[in-house]
Image (spheres, helix red, strand yellow):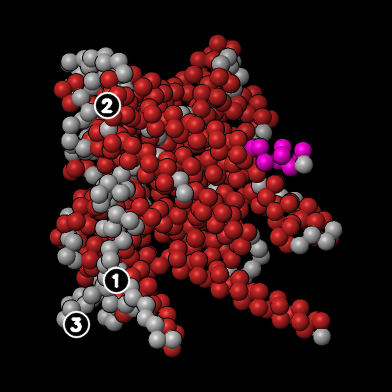
Amino acid sequence: MTRIRVNTTKGISSVLTYAGLILIALFALFPFLWTLAISLTDKTVTSGVSIYDFPGSLFPKVITLNNFFAVFRDFSLNKYLWNSIVISGLSVIGTLLISALAAYPLSKLEFPGRNIIFTAILSTLVLPSETSFIVNVITLNRIGLLGTYWGVVIPIIATAFGIFLMRQAYISVPDALLEAARMDGATELQILFRVMIPLSIPSLTALGIFTLVNTWNSYFWPSIALIFNPELQPLSVAMLQLKSQLNHDPFNIAAGAMIMMIPVMIIFAFAQRFFMRGLEGAVK
Amino acid sequence: MRKSNIVFLAYAFLAPALILMAVFTFYPVIYGSWLGFTDYSQKNLSGEIPANFVGLENFKTVFADELFRTGIWNSLKYLLVVPVLQLASLGVAVLVNRQLPAITFFRAAYYVPVITSISLASVMWDWVYSKDGVLNWGIQFLVGIGNFFASLFGGKLEFQAFGWLNNPDTAIWAIMLVTFWRGFGYYMVLYLGGLQAIPLELEEAARLDGASPSQTFWRVTVPLMRPTILLCSLLSTLAAIRVLEEIIVFTNGGPLNSTYTALMYVYSKAFGSKFDFGTASAAGLLIAIVGFFLSYLNFRLTQEAPDRQRKA
């Protein structure tokens, strides 16, 4: 009798748990799923297809990829896509290089000033950065990089997060390995590139993926750094123009949105564990 | 290898990072503060004409400007998202911190909004919030159900559909919901990390001592999670007081300045029309002080609770 009751309570509670989980998942995914459905809808099939026809617009009757072609044709999406690729690519390479280099002396070399420098780097996490974008625009303008790809990238590639992540990875490499390499006559540069970096591939991958997704998605800084040169705007910034320019055609806007979102979703699907581990390394 | 060589190498490896940080992270804080005391504007951008020192003039302008007060007020209002977001994230983290079939799918699904760019969020949520959008449809649907019951008693419910982002009474709340949407998965992951660091034996022991699940949660889990809660609420508070991106992509401060936040003031002074960097920096400096004060307050609030418990 008691056993049965326990089982029923358990059953009900797990049904409730899953109902809750599914409800939250719908809240999280609904905007994405709806936009996906709109982007695939064939707007020419029946007269007066409306995205606001619920719940019909969630389940398109005829599926097409025409909206995706149309948005490339009407909005020169390839230009913005290319800008996004260049800016994200340069950011990833820059962040990896700078972090991998800076983390080495901070973890494995003894030199005066090491602690002060490390503290200074960490302190950037709490600096009041409210007006930094203003000064950075002035600086970039002075050195002639305002409105270029490099102008977007250079101010954002040296980060405490990246250096800290790589330092943690290097610390776990045994010193004996470095000593052995030094005995064999390896230079510090060789040790970095032949020992440390190959042994830190997981952290480098994680940092690369974080940087890629962040720069691909970022809106504010690129919109400021390219304020006088919209030609180089990445997709994330151009998206708002697309929104206002094609206001009459939500199907094409949805297709544009999906073109920007799908690469992120693919990366996320494969590299989920890096995200789910969160900032664990950096926080502790 | 000689000692001096090592020192040279160490600084050579550090140089790119240190130079970039000095120029683009530290220098802006110092020079940005200085700008607040000058009349820096478009004419100075070329670098040929130096800006003039104007003392506290900009601060007087900012304080006298009703828009700035509106901005501060709306940013403070925006802070209301913090406790809701943090409680919900912690709740969701507890919910998914179990070995259930398909739980990794749910965790991943909750993270999707986090990796959604704000510009895409603005496209999607604009449709949700529009007059013919899904939110109004959902409310109409519920009103319809409500009316079925109301009609039994001869009553009638009515709901007039409206654009949630076009209404000065609802716009800021609508944007706060998007902040919530994009935030709860992020904080869930941080809380999940904290929860998984708690030794299972502790909660087990509490259960064996006869503590109910809710007692275990409030008396064992939450106190042990204090460092994570402090970190998350600090991050969330600073993000809320500095909210800007969401505002730019959704409403640009309107309608009727109802979503005009503090940093929106800085942004529109600096890049709106006149490149008034002096006034913008002065306002930025004031917001930084508010942010600093809030961090301190947040620290005290989450730090003091255990002391009080110990005394009691």
Q: Nearer the viewer, mark 2 or mark 3?
A: 2
Q: Give the magenta part as a residue range.
A: B303-311
Magenta span has B307? yes
Q: Residue at x 29, y 70 (%)?
A: B161
- Name the element at disc 3: loop
Magenta span has B232? no
Q: Where in the figure is residue A259, as x and y percent of width and height?
A: 30, 60
Q: Nearer the viewer, residue A78 or A40?
A: A40
Q: Which residue is mark 2?
A: B61
Q: Is residue B29 visible?
A: yes
Chain of the residue where label 2 is placed in the rendered structure: B
Q: Which residue is mark 1?
A: B160
Q: Is residue A198 left or right of residue B253?
A: right
Q: Where in the figure is residue A16, as x and y percent of width and height?
A: 60, 74
Question: How many C-alpha atoms fall within 10 Å of the one at disc 3: few (<14), some, or many (≥20)?
Answer: few
Q: Is residue A237 left or right of residue B13?
A: left
